[in-house]
Image (cartoon, rainbow, N blue to C red):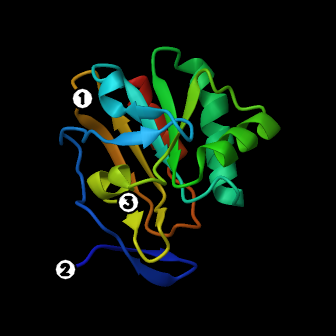
Amino acid sequence: MARTCTLKGNPLDLEGPELKVGDKAPLATLKKSLVDDFNLAEVAGKPRVYSVVPSLDTPVCAEQTKRFNKEMAALPNVAFFTISCDLPVAMNRFCGAEGINTERMKTLSDHKDTAFGKAYGVLIPKLRVLSRAVFVVGTDDKLRYVEYVPEVASHPNYDAVLAAAKSL
């Protein structure tokens, strides 16, 4: 049976597996700039939050990124990443305009080959964007929290994400 999410009530197919708490966090290579790659293996063994959004240029995605940017101050030992299919230059522009702390909130682009989207089961092939989701990964590189937000236009459960991150 195909996995789906909805966007304003309209069903959209998702590509990739449905990951669960306890699964090993998949590795993928993303873009940190148009020319520079970032392999998730670089943060293996570190506690981290992957905040996955369709596009920073939409209201819910912008709010989600700003919320985690604010909350991460209380979690200095946890690395935060915002991941989307936006181009790296667009992500950098957004962060600059919104005052996002890019030393702590790293933005990674899955635009090139959507390897992250396919590995984490969040790729919406029809739109070539990522579905909204949040993954919290422990020092053992296992998923400690997994949330696939069923309706792309809805927010994730911030309190549950932050509780999982604080437990790392």
Check disc 2: other Cα within 10 Å, few if <14, some if 14-19, many if 20+. Answer: few
**Residue 122 - label:** 3
* Percent coordinates x, y for residue 57 in the rendering: 70, 57
Q: Which residue is mark 2?
A: 1
Counting residues from the start of the chain, the first of labels 1 and 2 encountered is 2
Give the residue drawn at x 67%, y 30%.
Answer: 70
The amino acid sitting under disc 1 is: Asp
Vertical side of 54 occupied by 5: above or below: below
Label pair 1/2, CB-CB below 8 angstroms: no
Q: Quadrant of the C terminus?
A: top left
Residue most extreme to the front: 35
The residue that disc 1 covers is 141
Q: Residues within 10 Å of mark 3 (few under 14, many from 20)?
A: many
Residue type at mark 3 is Val
Quarter of the image containing the N terminus?
bottom left
> Relative to 130, does residue 47 appear above or below in the rendering?
above
User: Separation of disc 2 and disc 3 at Cα?
Assistant: 16 Å
